[in-house]
Image: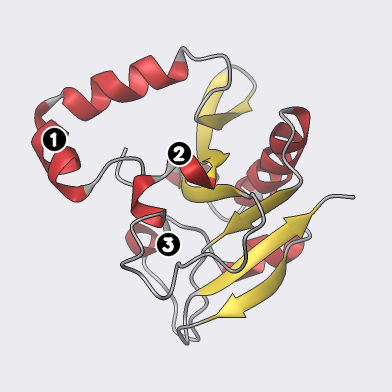
Amino acid sequence: MFWKLPRAEWEAGRTGGNQRAMQRAAQRRIPPGLLAYDGDEPVGWCAVEPRANYARLNTGRSKVLAPVDDQPVWSVTCFFVARTHRRRGVTVELLKAAVRHARKHGGRIVEGYPIDSPKPQADTFAYTGLKAAFDQAGFHEVARRSPTRPVMRCEMT
């Protein structure tokens, strides 16, 4: 819910309200993200929705995450991969699934805001994904307003 709510609302919901809000969102016709499974075990999560659904991307406060153009895009905002399944391609598969999911629901562009740093990143700080995973999933860089934060896109034809 961090990306979906203005900061004050997100802070106020930290004692359970955000969890209830996410449970409600998961019941909608178009879910707020995708799960990855290894057999019956959930091992990963990817948040993906139309950019318009993410209040934090639409405040106009961040030059780094400002819209690239006026095209309607779906945004991949965060990932979680179980420690036991990291570095096994789960994020790449989630990105590919996010593109299929967006296409199924009328999306034509999927965008993400990963980390691209020459220094190794602690998993905690890589929750928006790593550029290498976006590259492997077929995304390309369309903007870079910060040395470590490219805007990556996958445009469907």
Q: Is label 1 in a helix, a strand or a loop?
A: helix
Residue 77 in percent (x, y) is at: 47, 50
Q: What residue is drawn where x is 45% and y is 67%?
A: 65
Q: Are marks 1 and 2 in contact (CB under 8 Å)?
A: no
Image quadrant in which the N terminus is located: top left
Q: What residue is drawn where x is 13% and y is 45%?
A: 8
Give the side of residue 96 with respect to residue 132, left or right.
Answer: right
Q: Are marks 3 and 2 in contact (CB under 8 Å)?
A: no
The residue indicated by pointer 2 is 53
Q: Quadrant of residue 111?
A: bottom right
Up the image or down, 122 lies above or below 156; here it is below
Q: Nearer the viewer, residue 137 or 142?
A: 142
Q: Are marks 3 and 1 in contact (CB under 8 Å)?
A: no
Residue type at mark 1 is Arg
Residue extending farthest to the front is 70
Q: Nearer the viewer, residue 21 or 71?
A: 71
The residue indicated by pointer 3 is 126
The residue indicated by pointer 1 is 14
Tell me the number on the disc at residue 96.
none
Q: Is residue 92 visible?
A: yes
Residue 114 in percent (x, y) is at: 52, 65
Q: Is label 3 in a helix, a strand or a loop?
A: helix
Q: Residues within 10 Å of mark 2 (few under 14, many from 20)?
A: some
Give the side of residue 101 with respect to residue 31, left or right.
Answer: right
Residue 21 in percent (x, y) is at: 29, 22
